[in-house]
Every structure is written in structure tokens, then in C-alpha cells.
């Protein structure tokens, strides 16, 4: 079983929902949603929706460490590298990409034609829901 950690950093991402992923070998996938805020049960002010720059700068290291721990512990207990799904190039996506990679996860990002991918991206999410290994 492979774990998928979906990063939600703004209300817009929350409204979009979680994209459907299909692994090529028919392996089962367990979804985990991580909200870029202090409370995971009741998401309040998500990091990308915060208006205060000071609030964002103070919360960013704490949120990065929490995601790092989630990815690291998921990898430790499942025995497989979890997939960390990020969308966009917002602050929460950048934090999730680097913290997820440091925790031992594989970063998944849908390709955006006008923009380059974030550095730690390992897989591209194709429109049909399959993953493709990034070749750069």
C-alpha cells in the first residue's frame, strides 16, 4: 500500500478537491490530507490565505517541521516512500515540496505549461491520473 499526502494550503485548493491518482501496477493508495495550518481537524486560516506577512513567516518553519514529521513517520511505519501531492507554486507548496523531500517522500506535481516545476518534484501527475517519472 502506498500513501498519498495531499497538501492543502488555501481555500481555493480546498474547493478544488483531491485529484484521483492511479498507480500503474494497480497498487492500493491511502489518502492523507495535510492542511497548512495549526489545527488539522478544523482548518482555520490556511497559510496561503493569511494576510499578514509576519504570520506567514512565523508559521512557516513550524508547518514545515510538522509535514516533515508526517512524511518521515509515514515512511518509517509503512516501509514505502509516501507520495506528497502539491499544486501550484504558493508558499505552502514550496514548504511542502522541500519538507516532504527531506522527510523521504516522493513529490508529485501536475505540470503547468507556463511555469517550471519546483526543484524536488520527482513525479508528474498526468491528466488521466497516472504518474510519470520526471526526466530533466
Image (spheres, helix red, strand yellow):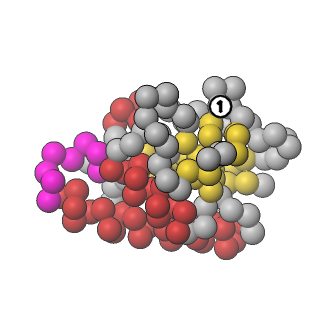
Q: Name the residue at 70% across, 40% down.
A: 132
Where residue 95 sits: x, y (%)? 40, 57
Label 1 packing within 10 angstroms: few (<14), some (14-19), many (20+)? some
Q: Name the residue at 15% across, 54% down.
A: 53
Which of these two is toward me, 86 or 116? 116
Where residue 22 sits: x, y (%)? 74, 37
Q: Is residue 108 left or right of residue 118?
A: right
Does the magenta portion include 100? Answer: no
Quarter of the view holding residue 77: bottom right
Eyeballing the image, is 13 above or below 1?
Answer: above
Where residue 92 sits: x, y (%)? 37, 51
Q: Majority secondary structure of the magenta segment?
A: helix
Eyeballing the image, is 129 above or below 44?
Answer: above
Disc 1 element: loop
Where residue 121 sits: x, y (%)? 56, 50
Residue pointed to by mark 1: 126
Q: Residue furthest front?
A: 136
Q: Is residue 123 left or right of residue 121?
A: right
Quadrant, the N terminus: bottom right
Q: Is residue 42 visible?
A: no
Amino acid at each position: 500500500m502506498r500513501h498519498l499526502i495531499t497538501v492543502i494550503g488555501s481555500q481555493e485548493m480546498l474547493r478544488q478537491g483531491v485529484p484521483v491518482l492511479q498507480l500503474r501496477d494497480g497498487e492500493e493508495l491511502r489518502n492523507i490530507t495535510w492542511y497548512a495550518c495549526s489545527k488539522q481537524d478544523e482548518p482555520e486560516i490556511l497559510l496561503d490565505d493569511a494576510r499578514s506577512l509576519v504570520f506567514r513567516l512565523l508559521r512557516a518553519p513550524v508547518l514545515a517541521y510538522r509535514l516533515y514529521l508526517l512524511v518521515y513517520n509515514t515512511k518509517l511505519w509503512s516501509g514505502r516512500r509516501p507520495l506528497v501531492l502539491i499544486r501550484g507554486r504558493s508558499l505552502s507548496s514550496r514548504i511542502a515540496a522541500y519538507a516532504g523531500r527531506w522527510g523521504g517522500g516522493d513529490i508529485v506535481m501536475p505540470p503547468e505549461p507556463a511555469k517550471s516545476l519546483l526543484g524536488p518534484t520527482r513525479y508528474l501527475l498526468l491528466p488521466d491520473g497516472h504518474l510519470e517519472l520526471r526526466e530533466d
